[in-house]
Image (cartoon, coloured by chain):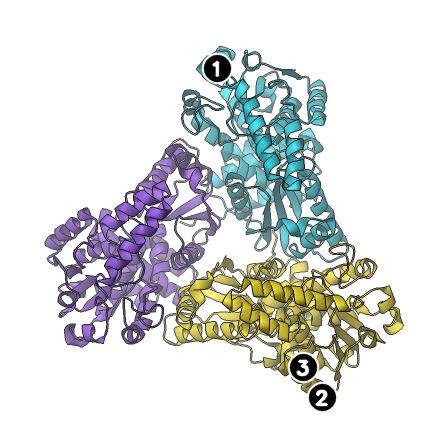
Chain colours: A yellow, B purple, C cyan
Amino acid sequence: MPSKEISKRLSELKKLKTELYHRDFLLTWEKSLDEIKAVAIIAEILKCMHKENINTKIFETGLAISIFRDKSTRTRFSFASAVNMLGLSLVDLDEEKSQISHGETVRETANMISFLTEVIGIRDDMFLGEGNKYMREVADAVEEGFKEGVLHQRPTLVNLQCDVDHPTQSMSDLLKLKNYFGGFEKLKGKKIAMTWAYSPSYGKPLSVPQGIIGLMTRFGMEVTLAYPEGYNLIEDVERLALDNAKKSGGSFRKVHSMEEAFKDADVVYPKSWAPFSVMQRRTELLKKGDREGLKELERECLANNAKYKNWECNEKMMRLTKNGSALYMHCLPADISGVSCAEGEVSKEVFERYRIHTYDEASYKPFVIAAMILTSRFKNPYKILNMLLNRKVKRIKD
Amino acid sequence: MPSKEISKRLSELKKLKTELYHRDFLLTWEKSLDEIKAVAIIAEILKCMHKENINTKIFETGLAISIFRDKSTRTRFSFASAVNMLGLSLVDLDEEKSQISHGETVRETANMISFLTEVIGIRDDMFLGEGNKYMREVADAVEEGFKEGVLHQRPTLVNLQCDVDHPTQSMSDLLKLKNYFGGFEKLKGKKIAMTWAYSPSYGKPLSVPQGIIGLMTRFGMEVTLAYPEGYNLIEDVERLALDNAKKSGGSFRKVHSMEEAFKDADVVYPKSWAPFSVMQRRTELLKKGDREGLKELERECLANNAKYKNWECNEKMMRLTKNGSALYMHCLPADISGVSCAEGEVSKEVFERYRIHTYDEASYKPFVIAAMILTSRFKNPYKILNMLLNRKVKRIKD
Amino acid sequence: MPSKEISKRLSELKKLKTELYHRDFLLTWEKSLDEIKAVAIIAEILKCMHKENINTKIFETGLAISIFRDKSTRTRFSFASAVNMLGLSLVDLDEEKSQISHGETVRETANMISFLTEVIGIRDDMFLGEGNKYMREVADAVEEGFKEGVLHQRPTLVNLQCDVDHPTQSMSDLLKLKNYFGGFEKLKGKKIAMTWAYSPSYGKPLSVPQGIIGLMTRFGMEVTLAYPEGYNLIEDVERLALDNAKKSGGSFRKVHSMEEAFKDADVVYPKSWAPFSVMQRRTELLKKGDREGLKELERECLANNAKYKNWECNEKMMRLTKNGSALYMHCLPADISGVSCAEGEVSKEVFERYRIHTYDEASYKPFVIAAMILTSRFKNPYKILNMLLNRKVKRIKD
């Protein structure tokens, strides 16, 4: 008999209408609200099952492939954990840049690695206008391979961070918020400040703040996006956030002051990113391999960042929030003043107070990825989860 | 009850006499015709089982080791898929060249990595006279370890491409041909043109063309090997092909014109390779680490290649083949004119028409490797396959 | 019904009192004698089970993480084998040095990679005073994560070699000795010579000789540590060996002559290492990234080594041992005169005579690591082993 924790969530799940079967997970805003909720709830159920030592293996054999076009430790381990939990074996594609320079090869490689592959996870967040496009090229390729009978199954694509969205992160953040406040419905009216913060580095992707404003506006939250003049995100995503807010009964506004954003906030998410225009110039320079240009851009950008060193999440800032005790969030690793850098996104004191909260926030990610895979590969996730619960196989023998 | 597809192949398999148990798979011509057929048919059965969602796991635990002394994506994934399908975990040996410079260390390393290892897959195709020799050194080492009681089991070696043969490729090609024409017996009398083709690169191994002429001549095919003067293969293999053809009632001839080879061909396999003599010089230069010499050789060789740009498989060439519609084959990736290079092995139009066929050709490889392992580790593959079919365990739960 | 081999060891195991549950394995001298014996015996049982084709999988899913801060092939494969045998999937953390430069990040990374992780194996033997410390930092971090509820389980740490000890090696050596002489009790009074030997390289870690003198002195052996003046080990470990010997009724002495150490020895373990003082200077230079200094130190150290070329284990030396037939041991790879170097630790003749013995010595390591994990993750290893034996599941199907 499933635990109370699991039973409660199974009932929630049962009410939701989803069409996730055979669909990739590339952007949260391509999914309906029910679908977002379903993936989140399944992630929670899988987390409970892991905690309760219930075996979640649904594949006896099969590969999961990761393609990391940017260095990663955390997402790499989350993906490794997710696929392991379902019974798949991970193989990393160590892609040479030269091999993927034209569409022909993407199409071919995608099929060549997929004969026994159930899921492909891709991180490609370096080039504006590229990452998400590349994922769709891979998706089209395996779709063709499947339709032509070359592949026995159509591998699912999971976006492990692109230039536009970082859905496995924002979904983990959503679950942290859900559990912190006590349910999806409790998010309504809660104030979240997604703000830029100072960091002595540049070129950080836009996908985290974009993911947050694109997702939290759908739950009736009052979302404030704050950044210094010029640190814009992709315009389409800012517009989308506004539309979402209208529909959900929440709100979305932009301000250019950290203080203003923090005022009365229930949640703060201070994080550095590069301005959209800088990322565009950087993309051009990276494509050209213009090292001198990149150095010059970095110098310029760091000098510009340095004007905003006061965008630090410290005790003084935190006192502006609701009862001085907003929840501090971060996708990690944070640039912590006096710890990982002289001056950074967050003071040592604030970070330390919320450190375990940030670990907890991260702890959902493996299960979110597993839920994305499960919903895409099984027509009836509710039935599959019940099968797993009823077969009573322990994950660790005793 | 097994599907018709599977039952039919099981009956074919039952008739074959094989002694593959505890034998490595290093060269197709070390195997009897029955053994070649058995491995091919088992590969097909495993492919059907995968398609029909039947669990093919026969190992509960155990390692498979890959040693790639040359870069590879495709074969790497085929090997990873094959061992996963059987229940083994892949570990890649990232070998330092210095560690393997003398026999002593090969012998020791081979044993040190093999205590729980069931199969070792090796790709070593860079140095003429080396790759296959190295595989046999590893085989001798684990043989000694097993006999001396150091190893509980004797890992099987699978040749993932050497200087002499590329058996996992040629066996996949054989299966493509078998299924394209409708049976092994239908290959008799079919004309296949294994021809050199122009490519703006040099140093491509000889093992693919050698593998093709060494294998297809055993099935009564009329094999034409075509290359510009000077682009010889290893003499022994050319001789072997001639002997095979005599025994099988097929034929083997060499010509120096692509047109002549294509004439009335049922199958064409146009692919670039370096001349034997160039590979010999290259081996010397690589051993010496003579960079200047290698650059000079490359320049010279590319200049020589450039004389034969007309060795391109294009529509005009294809019209020479039987009814203008021979099957085009390639081990991939092909150098496609106007796509992956300005001028290459095959025109865009021809390649596009046969693209899905080439994917299909590649799709057999994981199953061929799995069949090589299965036949080497189990005395009675027929019995094991029946056990897998009768235990009725699904690969993916539902 | 378990085999005689297994039954005998199960009875031995039953008598031992251990508290290994939820404890890391970092230093053999942190474990009681009963605990050392229990881990050794469980390793033997697992080795028998592997040989007898009994499935030892106790985890259905779960990750094992390896962190290698020094190159390794052998230990890497032993760890890979051990975790595979228990049902875990290996993921290697390819750590950037910059990421681990301060405690904060170690703490965070340790948790971020551990959400579904059952064991973390670490090799960190380059810097004196660092390796073991780092392992304890990781241990503290996951301990905190577990207590705070971030981690559902507390991953076990296994020391795969540090600056102080190399427990997986010394435990394998212990098992070789136990089986060579016929039981733990037979080790009492046996003479083992752990001696320095000449090698044309420098900077070899001290952890192997330290591990040997720290462990074998606990079994009543007469341990002689021999090295040229100045090639000291860590003083604390030499002192510990003396204490151990007093308690166990064995002996521990230091001499500065290989001949003296070999005299009447039952076992010899000739192996090169760098003097403690050199390792200290090297640690400083490595930290500073002082290439010139490192080169100078190497030159100096090699010149010093060269004074002791007569510290070679050859036939003449071996004739000094008991009946001229002591057991030769080595952790491998050995520097073999005339094979892997001109002059080295051991002559070709001696090494060849004992080669298979050294392979056998190494063969325990995967099972030792598996036993370390099993005892740390299961309260009652005796019960778990019986469960594995009674469930009668074969590792390889037939």
Q: Amino acid at mark 1?
A: Met
Is the N terminus of chain A in the top left, top right, bottom left or bottom right quadrant? Answer: bottom right
Reading the image, the residue beneath label 2 is: A246
Q: Is residue C168 positioned above or below A380 on the image?
A: above
Place of residue B319 in the rendered image (x, y in percent of width and height, measured from the top left): 17, 75
Dot 2 falls on a residue whose secondary structure is helix
Q: Chain of mark 3?
A: A
Reading the image, the residue beneath label 1 is: C318
Give the CA separation, mark 1 to mark 2.
87 Å
Q: Residues within 10 Å of mark 1 (few under 14, many from 20)?
A: many
Dot 3 falls on a residue whose secondary structure is helix
Place of residue A189 in the rendered image (x, y in percent of width and height, measured from the top left): 79, 81
Reading the image, the residue beneath label 3 is: A238
Place of residue A330 in the rendered image (x, y in percent of width and height, measured from the top left): 73, 65
**From the viewer's perspective, is A238 left or right of B97?**
right
Identity of the residue drawn at 63% across and 78% down: A234
Give the CA separation, mark 3 to mark 1.
79 Å
Give the CA separation, mark 3 to mark 2.
13 Å
- Pair 3/1: label in front: 3
Q: Residues within 10 Å of mark 3 (few under 14, many from 20)?
A: many
Say whether residue C314 is visible: yes
Q: Amino acid at mark 3?
A: Glu
Camera-side residue: B239 or A105? A105
Camera-side residue: C101 or C151? C101
**From the viewer's perspective, is B342 left or right of A304?**
left
Q: Is residue B187 positioned above or below C71 on the image?
A: below
Place of residue A119 in the rendered image (x, y in percent of width and height, measured from the top left): 50, 67
Q: Amino acid at mark 2?
A: Lys
Identity of the residue drawn at 59% across and 72% down: A281
Identity of the residue drawn at 51% across and 19% down: C309
Q: Chain of mark 2?
A: A
